[in-house]
């Protein structure tokens, strides 16, 4: 509690932190809690959240602007597991779909075509658009639950590569055009540090994976991490 209290003292309030978590929910039937608040570095703050259902981010990044704290559109979801987590797959409720088209869905996260698709979520209440390699994942909210929701995305374009690295190439035998085998473990710990000019987020998952994100800054629209790199190991 001391670490969380110290982080709150330097950055956002507990109420603000929980409000950011709540606004990521596409249904009021589910709850997310703030598990850890990392002290801000250069007006950037990181929160670790519990995951109530699949495709909900476990790590979010906030940027302090003259207008106050703003959550980045890009969020993080460290961890992959090929066995059921018990978390709800939103598609089983008939709200959302995985789709692919030509070769465009195999492009990287920074490609303009992918960004156009991802940012379509900014124009539609209750939509979550997440790119994988080879397909696009989309969740939609129950209309009555979308009023307080603020859209987000997660870069999963390299998750197939990470999964094969973590699971000895088993993912080459799975169907690769849908999200079914990319289940979500909880994140049990997270650190946020600065090394030189590079920001580092290190997350440890419940299934013993270490995910390290590095980035140089936040873009001017508070949407994406600039020069983000992801490193994954068991």
Image (cartoon, rainbow, N blue to C red):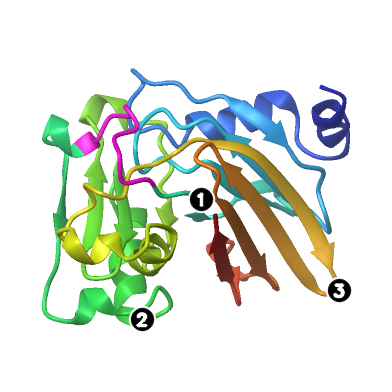
* Quadrant of the image occupied by residue 72: bottom right
Which residue lies at the image location 84% right of the left edge and 31% below the top edge? 3
Q: Which mark is residue 196?
A: 3
Question: Distance between the Cα atoms at labels 2 and 1?
Answer: 24 Å
Q: Nearer the viewer, residue 11 or 81?
A: 81
Which residue lies at the image location 83% right of the left edge and 68% below the top edge? 195
Q: Residue furthest front?
A: 168
- Residue 36's x, y, as percent? 69, 33
* Tag 1 residue: 78
Which residue lies at the image location 73% right of the left edge and 36% below the top edge? 37
Magenta residue span: 81-90
**Magenta stretch containing residue 84, yes or no?**
yes
- Residue 167's x, y, as percent? 38, 57
Using the image, determine if residue 186 lies above or below residue 164: above
Question: Distance between the Cα atoms at labels 1 and 3?
Answer: 24 Å
Residue 207: tell me if it is visible.
yes
Which quadrant: the N terminus? Answer: top right
- Residue 57's x, y, as percent? 47, 43
Q: Which mark is residue 191?
A: none
* Quadrant of the image occupied by residue 12: top right
Of the two numbered discs 1 and 3 on the same chain, state the one appearing first in sequence: 1
Residue 194 located left or right of residue 37:
right
Question: Distance between the Cα atoms at labels 3 and 2?
Answer: 30 Å
* Tag 2 residue: 112
């Amino acid at each position: 509690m001391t670490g969380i209290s110290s982080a709150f003292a330097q950055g956002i309030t507990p109420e603000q932190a929980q409000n950011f978590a709540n606004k990521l929910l596409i249904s009021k039937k589910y709850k997310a809690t703030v598990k850890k608040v990392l002290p801000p570095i250069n007006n950037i703050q990181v929160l670790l959240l519990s995951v109530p259902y699949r495709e909900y981010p476990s790590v979010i990044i906030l940027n302090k602007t003259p207008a106050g704290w703003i959550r980045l559109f890009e969020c993080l979801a460290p961890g992959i597991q090929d066995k059921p987590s018990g978390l709800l797959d939103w598609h089983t409720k008939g709200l959302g779909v995985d789709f692919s088209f030509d070769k465009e869905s195999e492009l990287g996260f920074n490609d303009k075509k992918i960004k156009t698709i991802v940012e379509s979520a900014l124009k539609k209440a209750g939509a979550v658009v997440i790119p994988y390699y080879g397909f696009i994942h989309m969740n939609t909210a129950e209309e009555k639950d979308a009023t307080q929701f603020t859209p987000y995305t997660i870069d999963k374009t390299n998750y197939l590569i990470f999964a094969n690295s973590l699971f000895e190439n088993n993912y080459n035998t799975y169907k690769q055009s849908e999200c079914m085998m990319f289940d979500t473990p909880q994140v049990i710990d997270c650190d946020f540090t600065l090394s030189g000019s590079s920001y580092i987020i290190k997350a440890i998952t419940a299934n013993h994976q270490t995910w390290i994100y590095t980035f140089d800054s936040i873009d001017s629209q508070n949407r994406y991490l600039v020069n983000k790199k992801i490193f994954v190991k068991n």
